[in-house]
Image (spheres, rainbow, N blue to C red):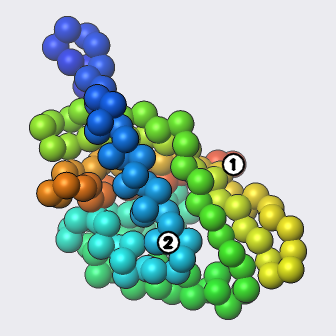
Amino acid sequence: MTAPAGDGTVATVDATVYAELQQFYAGQMQLLDDGAADEWARTFTLDGVFEQNVLPRPWRGRDEIAAKMRAAVGKVAAQQLDRRHWIGMVTARLAGPDVVHTRYYATVVQTRKGGSAELHLSTCAEDVLVRDGGSWLVEHRSVRHDGTAAEG
């Protein structure tokens, strides 16, 4: 996703930026888990893209991302499920002064009311993040569900 630096090494982010990215992902996933689809969509650029290999086509633009995610969180709520997204193994590489490419694993655990937790799915995702003031926005997210074909 990123080219090596001129000397053949990979230009990784420093500890401060890495901590910012961890905070960004924690906040973003907590919004999603709380069912705050519109707020979650605002963590994407206006022309952001959200794609998953299990969807027929990418969601394009913040408005579509918000609408599609509102429908998705509504289905989860109707099933009386609590879902928790857990992101880990984040790698981050500089792609420009205000652009970072990340790759990470995400698992989704769900719990039915009165039930026990179960693993819903695991994924590998890649983001292009752009700095927005003191935080970050997703310009492009590509999510691949484990155990599925490369394309939906």
Quarter placement of the N terminus: top left
**Which residue is at the far right?**
115
Horizontal side of 74 relative to 141 (left or right) equals right
Q: Residues within 10 Å of mark 2 (few under 14, many from 20)?
A: many
Verify CB contact (< 8 Å) between mark 2 and mark 1.
no
Give the x, y percent position of residue 91.
42, 34
Residue shown at 47%/38% (left/top)?
Answer: 90
Drawn side of residue 141 relative to residue 83, left or right: left
**Residue 139 at least partly seen:** no
In this rendering, position of residue 62 left or right of residue 86:
left
Give the residue pinned by disc 1: 147
Badge 2 marks a residue whose secondary structure is helix
Res 76 seen here: yes
Residue type at mark 2: give it: Leu
Closer to us: 47 or 42: 42
2 or 1: tag closer to the N-terminus: 2
Question: What percent of the width, then of the height, locates residue 120?
Answer: 72, 62
- Say which mark, if any, is on residue 13: none
| Residue 93 % position (x, y) | 30, 32
Q: Which residue is drawn at 38% across and 63% down?
A: 50
- The kind of residue tagged 1 is Gly
Residue sitting nearer the eye, 59 or 78: 78
> What residue is drawn where x is 50% and y is 67%?
30
User: Does 17 sit above or below residue 119?
Assistant: above
Q: Nearer the viewer, residue 21 or 10?
A: 21
Q: Within 10 Å of the Cα at label 1, are there few (<14), some (14-19), or many (20+) other Cα atoms? A: few
Distance CA(mark 2)–CA(mark 1): 23 Å
Look at the image and tell me in which quarter the C terminus lies. bottom right
Q: Quadrant of residue 83?
A: bottom right
Identity of the residue furthest to the bottom in this view: 78
Label placed on residue 32: 2
Tell me where residue 97 appears, x and y as whole percent.
Answer: 12, 37
